[in-house]
């Protein structure tokens, strides 16, 4: 809640600034209004409570009644929520509430499509750190609402030894050894690999998870066979809705998809006064 409120307050300050000139000029003080949030297309909902929080932070007497819940599919024309309060508050919160709700629902909707594509394979879709600066908490929440899992949240809560770490440390074995020595024993160590030789090195070093980066399908199959359940496997790099099923069928445990949070389309939602 603290992170969400910080995001909302910044967005409101950015949008309203020293004052809403149009509302101040047009709306009489004390005017009340009732409005509804309406879906203009089919999508998976995420961020309805965030939208409600926008109006609450502007004026805690504003009534917000949600009719649908995050993670639920909604249909075009459905009313998502009713809002009642001062007309000025509704108008000042409208754009921030819609911006966040539309973006978050867009992420949940795209995520749900990736999750459906891999049904029955055993592969788990996960996100990445390729998020909008400042909005990571909301975007990763939306990934969960779409049915996928979160990868590490940030640099502070997981060890992922990537290509540049390996180069700076002097090799995979040395990098993993240092991580084992210095990191808490409760953390799993993941190593990025680019070919089968590096997969072998990661296995020998004792990596818990092996990231198979930008590998072709046949190479992925060979890597999964080589790993042989001695570690978990994760495919990554350029994953699309068209390719994700074939990747899942290679037997990998996880598929990380940056597109979930950097290539989604915001959905269409309107706020209409009644």
Image (cartoon, rainbow, N blue to C red):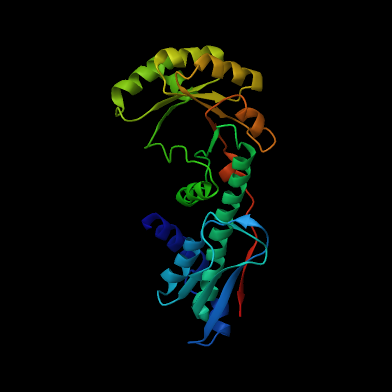
The foreground one among 22 and 246 is 246
Residue depicted at 51% across the width and 79% down the height:
88
The foreground one among 191 and 36 is 36
Question: Residue furthest toward the right?
Answer: 242
The foreground one among 7 and 64 is 64
Q: Can residue 171 be seen in this view?
A: no
Q: Position of residue 21 (x, y in %)?
A: 55, 77
Q: In the rendered view, tell whether residue 111 sits above or below residue 272.
A: above
Q: In the rendered view, tell whether residue 15 sits above or below residue 257.
A: below
Q: In the rendered view, tell whether residue 37 sits above or below residue 142.
A: below
Quadrant of the rendered structure where residue 9 is? bottom left
**Quadrant placement of the C terminus:** bottom right
- The number of numbered badges drawn on the structure is 0
Q: In the rendered view, tell whether residue 44 sits above or below residue 261.
A: below
Q: Is residue 107 visible?
A: yes
Q: Where is residue 262 in the image (x, y as percent from the top left)?
A: 58, 44
Q: Position of residue 268 (x, y in %)?
A: 65, 61
Residue depicted at 51% across the width and 57% down the height:
70
Q: Is residue 42 left or right of residue 177?
A: right
**Quadrant placement of the N terminus:** bottom left
Q: Position of residue 155 (x, y in %)?
A: 40, 36
Residue depicted at 53% across the width and 42% down the height:
148
């Amino acid at each position: 809640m603290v992170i969400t409120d910080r995001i909302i307050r910044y967005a409101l300050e950015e949008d309203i600034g020293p004052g809403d000139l149009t509302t101040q000029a047009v709306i009489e003080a004390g005017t009340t209004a009732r409005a509804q949030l309406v879906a203009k297309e089919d999508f998976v909902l995420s961020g309805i409570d965030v939208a409600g929080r926008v109006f609450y932070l502007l004026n805690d007497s504003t009534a917000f009644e949600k009719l649908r819940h995050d993670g639920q599919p909604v249909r075009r024309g459905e009313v998502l929520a009713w809002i009642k309060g001062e007309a000025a508050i509704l108008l000042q919160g409208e754009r921030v509430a819609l911006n966040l709700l539309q973006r978050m629902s867009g992420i949940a909707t795209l995520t749900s499509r990736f999750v459906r594509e891999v049904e029955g394979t055993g592969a788990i879709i996960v996100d990445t750190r390729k998020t909008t600066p400042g909005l990571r908490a909301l975007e990763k929440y939306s990934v969960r609402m779409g049915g996928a899992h979160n990868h590490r949240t940030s640099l502070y809560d997981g060890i992922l030894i990537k290509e540049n770490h390996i180069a700076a440390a002097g090799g995979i074995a040395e990098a993993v050894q240092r991580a084992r020595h210095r990191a808490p024993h409760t953390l799993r160590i993941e190593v990025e690999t680019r070919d089968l030789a590096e997969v072998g090195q990661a296995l020998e070093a004792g990596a818990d998870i092996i990231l198979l980066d930008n590998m072709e399908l046949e190479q992925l199959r060979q890597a999964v066979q080589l790993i042989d359940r001695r570690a978990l496997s994760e495919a990554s790099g350029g994953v699309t809705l068209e390719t994700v099923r074939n990747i899942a069928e290679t037997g990998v445990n996880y598929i990380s998809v940056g597109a979930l949070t950097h290539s989604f389309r915001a959905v269409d939602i309107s706020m209409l006064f009644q």
